[in-house]
Image (spheres, rainbow, N blue to C red):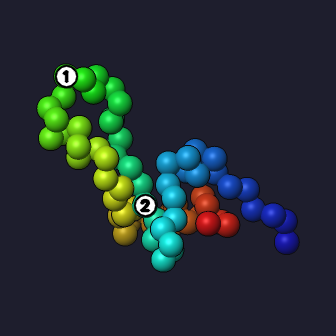
Amino acid sequence: MPKLKTHKGAQARVRFSGSGKLLRMKGHSSHLRRKKPKRTRRMYDDTLPVSRADRAKVRRLLPYG
């Protein structure tokens, strides 16, 4: 069976936690950041789990994760 290719865009955006969960960052975090409230800027610092609806799609893009 041939090797599966990793989707590099997904690899840059999603990472696996130690227990195997998929984690992502929020989007739109760097655009016009200085004028956003401090509370909003802090909210962009968190990593969030990938939603259950998208997990299977993302795992297909990252076969060796």
Q: Is 54 or 33 nearer to us in this picture?
A: 33
Instruction: Name the spot of residue 15 as percent of width and height, x first.
Output: 51, 58
Q: Secondary structure at mark 2?
A: strand
Locate residue 65 relative to residue 33 in the image: left or right: right
Q: Which quadrant is home to the C terminus?
A: bottom right
* Residue that carries the numbered disc 1 in the rendered image: 35
> Is label 2 in contact with label 1 (beta carbons under 8 Å)?
no
* Residue that carries the numbered disc 2 in the rendered image: 23
Locate residue 39 relative to residue 16 in the image: left or right: left
Q: What residue is at 27 percent from the left and 27 percent from the top?
A: 33
Q: Is 63 or 12 nearer to us in this picture?
A: 12
Q: How many marks?
A: 2
Label 2: how many Cα within 10 Å (few below 14, some 14–19, many 20+): some
Q: Residue furthest bottom?
A: 19
Instruction: Name the spot of residue 63 as percent of width and height, x first.
Output: 65, 66
Q: What residue is at 64 percent from the left and 51 percent from the top?
A: 7
Residue type (three-letter) at the residue carrying disc 2: Leu
Give the foreground label among 2 and 1. 1
Of the residues under marks 2 and 1, which one precedes in the sequence? 2
Q: Which quadrant is home to the N terminus?
A: bottom right
Q: What residue is at 35 percent from the left and 41 percent from the top?
A: 27
Q: Is residue 29 above or below residue 8?
A: above
Distance Cα–Cα, label 2 vs label 1: 27 Å
Instruction: Name the spot of residue 50 as percent of width and height, x first.
Output: 39, 62
Q: Is residue 32 above or below residue 61?
A: above
